[in-house]
Image (spheres, rainbow, N blue to C red):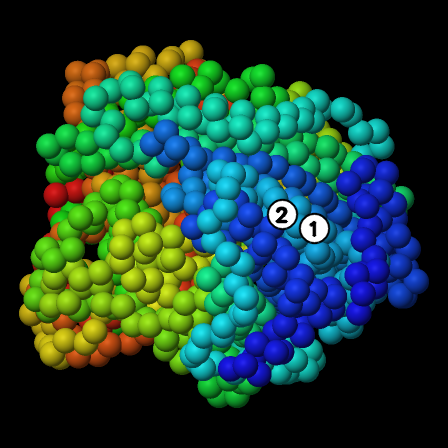
Amino acid sequence: MTQEAKQVVPAATPEALRALVSEVLAEALRQGASEAEATASVSQGLAVTVRLGDVETVEHTRDKGLGVTVYFGKQSGSASTSDLGFEAVRGAVRAAASIARYTAADECSGLADTAVLARSIPDLDLYHPWNPGADRAIEIAAACEHAAREADARIRNSEGASLTSHEGLEVYGNTNGFLGTVAATRHALSCAVVAQDDSGMQRDYWYTVARDASELEALEVVGRQAASRAVRRLAARKLSTRQTPVLYEAPVASSLLSHFVGAVRGASLYREASFLLDQLGKPVFAPWIRLYEQPHLRKGLGSAPFDNEGVATRDRDLVRDGVLLGYVLDSYSARKLGMQTTGNAGGVHNLTIQPGSDDLPALVRRMYTGLLVTELIGFGVNTVTGDYSRGAAGFWVENGEIQYPVEEITIAGNLREMFRQIVAVGRDVDLHGNIRTGSILIENMTLAGA
Amino acid sequence: MSNMLERVRGTLLEPAGIGEGDVGRLMGALLNHRLDYADIYFQYSRHESWSLEEGQVKTGSHNIEQGVGVRAVSGEKTGFAYSDEIMLPALLEAASAARAIARQGSGLTVPSAWRSIPVLDLYQPLDPMTSLEDGAKVKLLEQVETEARRQDPRVKQVMASLSGVQEIVLVMRSDGVQAADIRPLVRLSVTVIVEQGGRREQGSHGGGGRFSYQDLLGEGAAMTYAREAVRQALVNLEAGAAPAGTMKVVLGPGWPGILLHEAIGHGLEGDFNRKGTSAFSGRIGERVASDECTVVDDGSLPGRRGSLNVDDEGTPTQQTVLIENGILKGYLQDLLNARLTGMTPTGNGRRESYAHIPMPRMTNTFMLAGTYDPGEIIASVDKGLYAVNFGGGQVDITSGKFVFSTSEAYLIENGRVTRPVKGATLIGNGPDVLTRVTRVGSDLQLDSGVGTCGKDGQSVPVGVGQPTLLIDGLTVGGTHGS
C-alpha cells in the first residue's frame, strides 16, 4: 500500500476539529444510531529535564484522539482512536455501534437534556501559548535547579528540574446540536532535590503551574522552596502511638476534599458505595464550613465553560454552614438518582473551601501540640465506609512551635468524623490545582508509630 | 521467531508503506549526529472493556492506539519524540526533534543489516478480543454477577468488568538489533457491596494474564473471583477497629507480596541507583534482609501479567536475583542505566507506550519459598496482625519509607487468628524491613494477575508474590491504640 492510502486530516485548527466532530456525528446517524456524542482533541508540547546542571531529557509531545459514544435507543457503545483519518474514524463509529448491540438497554442512558446544554460559551482566558523552545526551556530548568542546589550545602543530589509547556484544543459535540470548543494551555516548572547529612537522605520538591507562563512563580523561588522542603526533613524521627490533633499543610489538605468529592459523586451514590449516602440537607462538615465551585474563574486550572457532556457549568455552593447542599452529578447518575445534572461530567471545577483568617504559623500556634502533616503516601481510604489510614511525614509541634521532623508514621480516623472535626481552615490557599484550600486543622486522629 | 517478526512488520510497517530502506534512512537521520544509542519503537494496540453493574452490561468501549517513538541517547541525555502517524515524513520529523540533544558530528554508523535476537515464547501471539464472541463476554459478566449474588442475600451491588488488550511492538536499535512481540493481556475484576443492619462494606477480587478470555471461563477463574470478592466483603462486615502501633505482622501468601514491590523493588531500579537517590544506592553486597529471604524479579514466567518475551528495548526478560539469603545482589536495569553504570541489562526496560520513554521497571517480583509451615508461623505469634489482602501501596525511594494498605486482616491472639479488623495502612522502612523477617513459609504463591505499577506517570502491568512470612515489628496504622 502507499502512503496516500492513509488519508490524514489536517485537524490542528478549531475549524478542522469541529468539522471532524460533525462528520463523526453524521456518520453515527448514517450507521443507524438514534443519538451520538463525540470529543476530538489535539495537543502538543515540550518537556525538558535538567539534572545536575546537564540536560537529561528533551521530549516533544504531540497527541490527538477521537472518542465517540453512540446510542441505539437506550443501548450504547463507545470507541476511541488516535488515528483521525477518515477510515479509522469510521471504524471507531462501527466498533462503538457493534458494542451497542450487546449492551443492555438502560433507561437512564443518553445525551444530556437539551435544556441544560451551554447556550453561550464564555471565554475563560485559558489559552496562552508560550513555545519557549528547547534551548530556552533548558536554561530555565537549569537555573531553577541551580537555585535549589545553591540554597543549602546539604543539597547533595538532585532528581532534576523540569519545564513543561502544553497546549491543547478540544471539541465536544452531540446530536442535540451542541458543538463547543475549548483551547487551553498549561505550563509548569518543577524541581526535586535530595538533602543529605549524617542522618540520611530526604527528597522533596516544589512546583509552579499556570495557564499563562507569565504567572509562573519565579524560578529561584521554586528552586529554593524545593531545597528548603528537602532540608527541613533531615533527621526525622518516629513518634510513639498516640491520639493527636493533625494539621494538614495546604498542598496535602486538598486530598481531604478530593475524598469528599469521591463520596458525593453520582456513581458512588447510586451504587450505594459512599459514606455520605442520603446526607443531602444534613450537616457533614463543621457548621462554619462553606465549599463552593467556581467553574468560570479566568485562567483557572479547573475552569471549564461546559462539562464533558456540553452542560453549562455554573457557580454553586456544595456545602454551606456545614450542610451538604449538592452532589457531583453527570446526566446519567442524576437520572439514576431522580435529580438534575450538576454540570460535573468529568469532575468538579475549582472546588474551593472558604479560607479562614490564620496563616500557617498561626494555625501551628493554635494547634499548640500536635502533628503538622506535609506529606501523605498510600491509598488507605475507603469511600464506602469513610475509614481512613495513610502514611504520613511532617513535623511534631509543641508549645505552638515546630519541634522536629517526623516520618514512618500513619494517621487514621473516619472521614465522616474528620470532616465534622475540622477546627480551622487557613488563608494560605494552595492554587496548584482544581481543589483550592488552605491548611486544614483536624481536632483528633490516631497517630501510629513506634 | 522470525515468523513473529514477519507478522509484526506486516501489521506495523507494510500498511504504512514503510520498507527496510525507509527504516535505514530514519536511523541514518538520527545517527548523523553524535549519539551513543538510538532506537525506534513501533506499536499498535487495541483495547476493549465491558462493564456490568445492577445486573446488566451497560457500557463497553473499544480503543485503538498506534504510533512510533524515536529516542536518541548521548551520555546521560535522552532526546525523545513520537508520532501517532506511522508515516515516513512524521517519523523523520520526530527523528530530527529527538536528535537535538546530540552535538554535531557523527558517531555510530547505520546498521547494514538488521539482526533478530532470540526472544522467549511465554504466551501465544493471540488476539484476546477475538477469542470469545461479544455476546459470550456479556454472558460471562452476567454469570459472575449471578454467582456473586448467589453467595449471600447481603450482597447489594455487584460491579464486574472484563478487559482485553493486544499489543504489537517492534523495536529497531542503532546496534542493528530488532525484536518483535505480540502481547495479549486479559483481566476480569469484581467488586461487591454488602449490607447488614445499615452497615456497608466492599470486597474486590480479580485476575488475568497473558492469555485468552477462554482461560477465564466456566467454573474456573471468573467464578472463583466472584466468590472471593463476596467472602472478603462479608468478613469486613464483622471487622472491628484495627490496632495502632508497632507489632508482629504475618503476611499471607500471594498478593501481599506488594510488600516486596514497594519496600525493595522500586528502590532497586537502576535509574535511582545510578543517580544515587535510592535508599539502596551503593549497597550491593550488603545485608538488607534476614538469611531467610531470597527475592527475585522474573519477567520470563509463562502467561503471567508481568511477563514479556522481550522488554521494550529488545532485551529478553530473565530471572534477576535481587536479594539472595539476605544479601543485596543486583539492580533492575534498562539499557541506558546498565551502560552508564557498567552493568548488564536485565530485560527490565519498559514503557507504557510508544509515547513514553523507557525506564527500569519491575516485571513479576517475588520471594522464594522458605521452610516453615504457614500454620506454625501464625501459631508462633502471641499478639499481632494477620494480613491476607491488600489494596495499593507506595514508596518514597529516597527515605525508603513505604506503605501498603490492608483490605482483609485479622488479629492474632495467643497464636490463633481471631477477629477481623478494618483496613489499615502498614508503614515501614524498605532497607531494614526484611531484616526483621524471622520466618518464611513454604507456600509461595503468585498473585492472580491484577497488578498495575505507576512510576513517573507511566503505568505497566506487573505481578507480585511471596510465601507466608512473619515480620517481627511493623507499624500498623489502625485507630485502636494498644
Residue at far bottom of view: B218
In x, y percent, where is residue B222?
49, 79
Q: Residue at x 29, y 19 (%)?
A: A150
What kind of element bears circle 1? helix
Q: Is residue B53 left or right of residue A218?
A: right
Find disc 2 in the rendering and name its residue: B94
Q: Residue at x 48, y 29 (%)?
A: A138
Q: How many marks?
A: 2
**Front in this rendered view, residue B451 or A283:** B451
Q: Is residue A238 above or below residue B373?
A: above
CA–CA distance between discs 1 and 2? 6 Å
What kind of element bears circle 2? helix
Find disc 1 in the rendering and name its residue: B90
- Amino acid residing under circle 2: Ala
Instruction: Locate residue B230: give its quadrant.
Output: bottom left
Q: Residue at x 81, y 37 (%)?
A: A14
Q: Residue at x 41, y 59 (%)?
A: B349
**Front in this rendered view, residue A24 or B482:** A24
Query: Can residue A182 be spotted in the picture?
Result: yes
